[in-house]
Amino acid sequence: MLLLNATEADRAQVAVIVADGIDEATLRTLRALRARGASTLVLVVTDVDDTGLFAAAEHGITGIIRRTEANADRLIIVIRAAHAGEGTIPPDLLGRLLQQVGTVQREVLGPRGLTFTGLTDREVEVLRLVADGYDTAQIAAKLCYSQRTIKNTLHNVMNRLHLRNRCHAVAYALRNGLI
């Protein structure tokens, strides 16, 4: 493990940000690091409220550790875990984050027919039937939609996710656990 100074930050494999709280200045720093290509971010923070926790997650934080817990050994563990692609978050914060995710799904996405996958229930069902080998007419009949609706649904998914064809869409959905 090598500690780099600010002028060498573009070489860093893990960026560690130390802040009192997750405020606009901290989020601005996270955005700037992301813009410079930092893909792995660890946040050492004194206070974490629910809004800040969710904002940190939205900004791609891989690990969070409280300053009171941030001794040398613990920091090394969190940094190594982040480098390996593993998230690290204190259990109480994880519970709060999961509650927030559930709230967003129920109160924001769900009423609009959306999920965190970015796919609607209809899109998921159409992709599931395509994966099962059904053609457009069979899917339309099974779901009580027109063939045009099924074609539009598939077209919208492929355009939004930049997929080339139905096979690519099914492979993407399978790889990402969407179906």
Image (cartoon, rainbow, N blue to C red):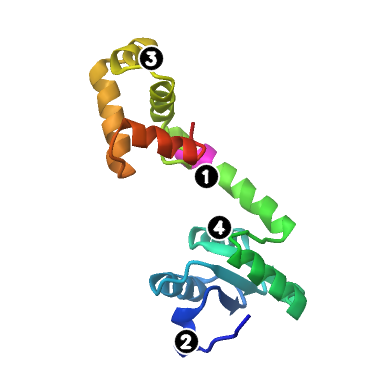
Question: Upstream in the sequence, badge 2 or badge 3?
Answer: 2
* Residue that badge 2 annotates: 8
Up the image or down, 101 lies above or below 27; here it is above
Residue 136 place in picture, x, y as percent: 29, 18
What residue would you read off at disc 1? Answer: 104
Q: Main secondary structure of the magenta part?
A: helix
Of pointers 3 and 1, the one earlier in the residue sequence:
1
Q: Are marks 3 and 1 in contact (CB under 8 Å)?
A: no
* Whole-number angstrom distance, CA of label 1 to CA of label 4: 10 Å
Question: At label 4, which amino acid type do we have?
Answer: Phe
> Of label 1 and label 2, which has the lower sequence position?
2
Residue type at mark 2 is: Glu
Question: For numbered disc 1, what is the local secondary structure?
Answer: helix
Taking the image as shown, residue 162 lies to the left or right of residue 18, namely left
- Residue visible at 61% across and 63% down in the picture: 84
Structural distance between the alpha carbons of marks 2 and 3: 56 Å
Report x, y in % for residue 149: 27, 22
Q: Badge 4: few (under 14), some or many (20 or more) residues near its Cα, within 10 Å?
A: some
Query: In this rendering, which labeled residue sits more in front, label 3 or label 1?
Result: 3
The disc placed on residue 119 is none
Q: Which circle's residue, 3 or 4, is located before the other in the chain?
A: 4
Between tags 2 and 4, which lies in front?
A: 2
**In the foreground, 179 or 112:** 179
**What span is in magenta?**
104-109
